[in-house]
Amino acid sequence: MLHTAAGLTPLVPTGHIPESPVPISPETAKLRARIAGRRRQDPNADITEEQRELKTLTLEERIRRVVESAPPLTADQIERLRALLPPVE
């Protein structure tokens, strides 16, 4: 058992990295790695498109998890959610 200076046991053992509470897809992980690589290579690189795509993938994954875990939505509920999205140009 690990102890801190105050004699308390820490919540997470030293050196242990807990699992992410929200798993990410391989596609998202690859994009995050690509963004990090570009930033390392050129801190001033324009990564706007990559960031936009990362936000889209993250939102898509979250929406998918919620929809899969919830009861089926009514047509009205779907329309209310659809109204949150900007129109396609």
Image (tube, helix red, strand yellow):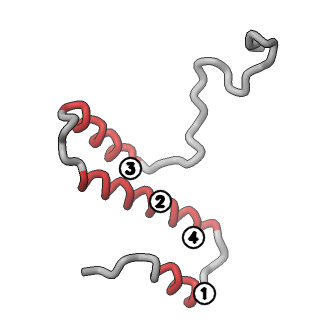
- Image coordinates of residue 40 in percent, x first then y, are 25, 31
Label 3 to label 4: alpha-carbon separation: 19 Å
> Which amino acid, mark 4?
Val
Picture mark count: 4
Hey, which residue is sitting farthest top in the picture? 5
> Which amino acid, mark 3?
Thr
Q: Quadrant of the N terminus?
A: top right
SS for callout 2: helix
Q: What residue did someone put label 1 on?
A: 74
Label 4 to label 1: alpha-carbon separation: 12 Å
Q: What residue did someone put label 2 on?
A: 61
Q: Earlier in the sequence, mark 4 or mark 2?
A: 2
Label 4 to label 2: alpha-carbon separation: 10 Å
Residue 28's label in the rendered image is: 3
Q: Residue at x 41, y 76 (%)?
A: 85
Q: Earlier in the sequence, mark 1 or mark 2?
A: 2
Q: What residue did someone put label 4 on?
A: 67
Residue 32's label in the rendered image is: none
